[in-house]
Image (cartoon, rainbow, N blue to C red):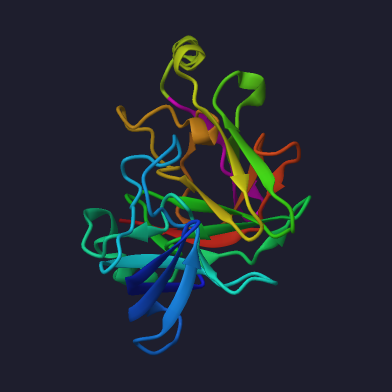
Amino acid sequence: MSDEIVVAAVKSIQGNGKILIEVKEWLKGAGKSGVNKMVGEVFTVRKGRFSPCQTTVVKEGLSYLFFLARPVSGEKFYRSVDKYDGVHPPNAPAVRGIAATIKEDGQATKWKKSSKGVQIKLLSNKKIYQKKDEINLNLLIKNAGNKNLTLKYRTWPTIEHSYCDVKIVQGKEATDALAVPIKREEILKYFSKHGQKYDLVLTPGQVHHFPLNKINTAVPGWGYKEKLGFKYYRPKEGQHLVSLDCKNFFYFPLRTDSIEIELQAD
């Protein structure tokens, strides 16, 4: 997901979402403590609908955990891999155990070219899961072109619904998608009133993180699985190839390469 993951102090705020940081600790990547880096795509003030309450707003003199992408061609600054979720206080509950997760045998595809300068990558934090484990996948969408791109996300109307089908294949056998245990009429009624939508402008080099959590469960109270098209999956024990086929983020589909995961008996 990230080229480098560091704990760093904010030395100065430059404006336009750019800051100068001093690295204190490397969790991913190689470098020395004390190295300075210019970083963009971070929040230095809280404003607008795309600055939710959980977004970290950095302050000069404080330290944070940064998930960074290296500079793209023609630029001299690093970027947060996700403008809304790429910076965290190092002691926040959301990032406890993150160092251990980084060291796990995670799986990731290479960046795959799609269309109009879009590149995509599929990740899983682990390769080997116990059958009782929740399987969480992550889709990264990068603007690798030289012009702004607009990513659209919709849960309503159904014809514009943005979601990902998960392809899970074991040998020649594919895992069937299962409908969530919620009546279709209830789903339509809810999203016709409370449908979510946003348009997100991706500047050149910017990466958007689209998490797909708990793809193998449908526990009551954990939502409608709208990011999965109101479906979930129950793969068998053994090795599987996993890929995504995502619709309605742009006017063209997003189809990732495959990663390999293994499910073991509890």
Depth check, front residue: 92 or 136: 92
Residue 36 in percent (x, y) is at 42, 81
Say which residue appears at 55% left-offset and 65% top-offset.
Answer: 108
Q: Is residue 209 left or right of residue 96?
A: right
Tag count: 0
Q: Would residue 173 be visible to someone looking at this image?
A: yes
Q: Would residue 231 be visible to someone looking at this image?
A: no
Say which residue appears at 61% left-offset and 44% top-offset.
Answer: 201
Say which residue appears at 36% left-offset and 44% top-offset.
Answer: 46
Q: Is residue 6 above or below residue 64?
A: below
Q: Is residue 213 above or below residue 2?
A: above
Q: Is residue 50 above or below residue 103?
A: above
Q: Main secondary structure of the magenta part?
A: strand
Q: In the picture, which quadrant includes the C terminus?
A: bottom left
Residue 234 in percent (x, y) is at 46, 41
Say which residue appears at 26% left-offset and 65% top-offset.
Answer: 90
Residue 41 in percent (x, y) is at 50, 57
Depth check, front residue: 70 or 159: 70
Q: Which stretch appears magenta?
A: 166-180
Residue 153 in percent (x, y) is at 58, 34
Q: Is residue 95 above or below residue 222?
A: below
Confirm whether the magenta stretch covers residue 177.
yes
Residue sitting at the far bottom:
32
Confirm whether the magenta stretch covers residue 137.
no
Q: Is residue 100 left or right of residue 205?
A: left
